[in-house]
Amino acid sequence: MKFKGFMMIVRAPFLLLALILGFLGASIAWYESREFGGNFNLGYAFLAGFGLIVAHISVNVWNEYFDYRSKIDLKTQKTPFSGGSGALPSGMVTPKQALWLGIINLIIIIPIGVFFTVVTGWLLLPLLVVAIGCIMLYTPFILKMGYPESAAGLGLGILPILGAYFIHTSEYTISALIASIPSGILVHNLLLLNEFPDVEADRTANRHTLPMTIGKKKTAIFYSVMMAVVYLWIIATVLSGDMPVFTLLGLLTFPLAFSAIEGAFKYDDISKFVPAQAKNVFVVLLTQLLIGIGFILGGVF
């Protein structure tokens, strides 16, 4: 496997999401350790971040592998944010190489999960089982069950933050869950908008994404509502005292989100829709990063 093919199939630029999720989970735990006392282990934070990156690579590789097997990669409308990397159809990565890459990354995840379960508590185990289930089952099964975007929001949004928080505190708290909700919605929306160009291709594989089941216009409306919920959630939780006031920094991405919402309704014009996809990616990453910085600032001041 050539290096370029490896970078393509793991979708290297998208691994920033895993880094930011790990940062946000650690930031919440660090903030609470400063405010209420408790443990925070910087080494654990880095190891968990590495584990999240490996897990995200697994998600990307398995998605590419199963998409290639179903021939969807040959039918999708390619954009920089959807339609697959093209690593397998181009021959830069073979199906066997992709399969082994996915297996190897899962093997790497297991000892990390075992370590954290042993040192922080067995209650981490159910979360890890659900997370691995999301990785393995998403493309071959979950995508065919209806509203798969919710699984992505859970498995690639809420659970990573709760896990990154748990390894420091050995518990799940309402405050951590509250802080993870915007991430769940944002990751949900990340996938949702990127599904629009793939509707016809997904139909041939008997998938049931939201743009397929309710139509693109209704999905664009739903996307808009969910995006608004993110910002309202941040405001409401700051007012209720469940998140520090500095997390209002997350509101700075609202103008970009509004522009992405406008672009979501231009799904029939790919030249205008792709910029909306790009803005959506920036909103997802920057909003979570700013919330994490808000927690750090809350612990400092």
Image (tube, rainbow, N blue to C red):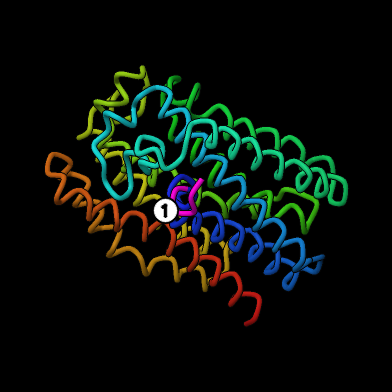
Across and down, in percent, residue 32 comes to 71, 66
Q: At 87% from the left edge and 51% from the top edge, which residue is drawn?
A: 119
Label 1: which residue?
Answer: 230
Across and down, in percent, residue 92 comes to 42, 43
* Quadrant in the picture for residue 39: bottom right
Taking depth in this image into account, of 22 and 81 the one nearest to the observer is 81
Query: Where 104 falls versus 112 (above or below)?
Result: above
* Quadrant in the picture for residue 203: top left
Query: Residue 294 lies in magenta, yes or no?
Result: no
Report whether residue 182 is seen: no
- Determine the residue located farthest toward the right in the rendered image: 118
Q: At 41% from the left edge and 56% from the top edge, which residue is drawn?
A: 284
Point out the stretch of residues depicted in magenta. 1-5
Q: How many marks?
A: 1
Name the side, left or right, on which 44 lies relative to 276.
Answer: right
Name the side, left or right, on which 233 lies relative to 204.
Answer: right
What main secondary structure does the magenta stretch of the protein show?
A: helix
Query: Where 98 falls versus 281 (above or below)?
Result: above
Q: Quadrant of the C terminus?
A: bottom right
Report whether residue 113 is seen: yes
Across and down, in percent, residue 24 comes to 58, 61
Q: At 39% from the left edge and 66% from the top edge, which residue is drawn?
A: 251
Query: Residue 3 lies in magenta, yes or no?
Result: yes
